[in-house]
Amino acid sequence: MSAAFTLSIDAMGGDKAPDIVIKGVALAHIRYPNVQFQLHGDEAKLKPLLAQEKKLESCCTIRHTDQVVTNDAKPSQALRQGRNSSMWKAIEAVKNGEAAGVVSAGNTGALMAMARLILRSLPGIDRPAICALVPTRNGETAMLDLGANAECDARNLVEFAIMGECFARALLGLERPKVGLLNIGSEDLKGTHMLREVSQTLRESHLDLEFKGFVEGDDIAAGTVDVVVTDGFTGNVALKTAEGTAKLVFEFLRIAIKSSWIAKFGMLFAKPVILQVVARVDPRRYNGALFLGLNGIVVKSHGGTDAVGFANAIGNAVDMVSRDLNRHIALDLERLRAEQAAARPAPDVPPEAGLATQ
């Protein structure tokens, strides 16, 4: 059971908002009865939906605004024209201390742009990153960045590794997560000079992680490590490729089942096993990507999810707030900076400078 705090909800964000948002909040309330919800959106649309969920009367408040950020809005447009939108107001509640975190199923680019502008980055973080869980042979693996930063330098990837291991400890309950750096090969000499620099930094650090070196694309599904670190361009391509492959496999399976009466008959016996597989890779189970590195908890739900998926996104926000994720990130960053400062050689002092002080 979680401690009492408030989450801010963008009630108008997503393909099926606000209906699935309210239903998702209702499911989340069953799991987290101590959490309060601040709903930002059109009161005329939200009130009838809340009236259908009597159990939400004591835990939900509405903050009215009739402006919405559309799914096709560009981030720059959303920043200029969306300052009275449900998304902006929901994020602003975190900045003002009214809520401990925010959940939205709205426009990803707009949400990131607004969150960076309103909340700013944590001290010591150059760029925030999008992190989410992906299913693997061994359970789940955290992967970042998934699209926030197309180009990254060595500092960014080191920070991603720190944020990723804190995320894995908070959400997966791991004391010392295994971290891998995505590369074109697992050998130490593979990849760019920048990747080798990141590898050396992580290998020599004394952080609460177990750095496993370079990992390849097939290591993601194998669950070789608990955290996969990469730039946003590569991460987004890898994620979309995996999602497309999963859809293709299930499409092949559907076609095969319909191909003959023997296949349809066999499906009667195979159905329980197939349902287990479907449940294992159900995208709703992994819904709720976190914008790591911001001065506040921001969770992005998939825009096309249903109530179950949105409730899971809320669950991720609850876990991150309850486990004080940002404090752990700040502590690890401080530890790394101290190690790097101690490793730097002392500046040369001319002999005459020492005599002048005597």
Image (cartoon, rainbow, N blue to C red):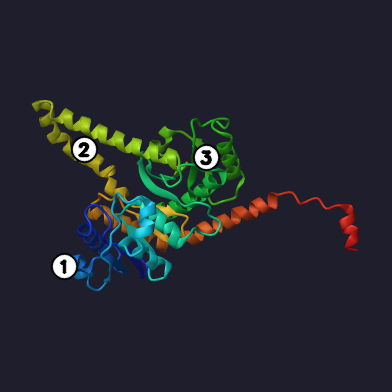
Q: Badge 1: few (under 14), some or many (20 or more) residues near its Cα, within 10 Å?
A: few
Q: Quadrant of the N terminus?
A: bottom left
Residue 299 appears in the picture as rendered:
no
Q: Quadrant of residue 321?
A: bottom left
Judging from the image, what secondary structure is the residue with disc 1 in? helix
**Label placed on residue 274:** 2
| x and y percentages locating residue 251 in the rendered image | 21, 33
To which residue does mark 1 refer? 48
90 up-or-down from 202: above or below: below
To which residue does mark 3 refer? 212
- Looking at the rendered structure, the kind of residue marked 3 is Lys
| x and y percentages locating residue 232 in the rendered image | 44, 43
- Which residue is located at x 69 percent, y 49 percent? 343
Q: Earlier in the sequence, mark 1 or mark 2?
A: 1
Q: Earlier in the sequence, mark 1 or mark 3?
A: 1
Judging from the image, what secondary structure is the residue with disc 2 in? helix
**Nearer mark to the viewer, of 1 and 3:** 1
- Which residue is located at x 28 percent, y 59 percent? 68
Q: Quadrant of the C terminus?
A: bottom right
Q: Is residue 179 left or right of residue 290?
A: right
| x and y percentages locating residue 169 in the rendered image | 45, 53
Q: Badge 2: few (under 14), some or many (20 or more) residues near its Cα, within 10 Å?
A: few
Measure how far apart labels 1 and 2 are at the Cα level.
39 Å
- Which residue is located at x 33 percent, y 65 percent? 84
| x and y percentages locating residue 140 in the rendered image | 37, 45
- Looking at the rendered structure, the kind of residue marked 2 is Ile
- Looking at the rendered structure, the kind of residue marked 1 is Pro
309 up-or-down from 134: above or below: below
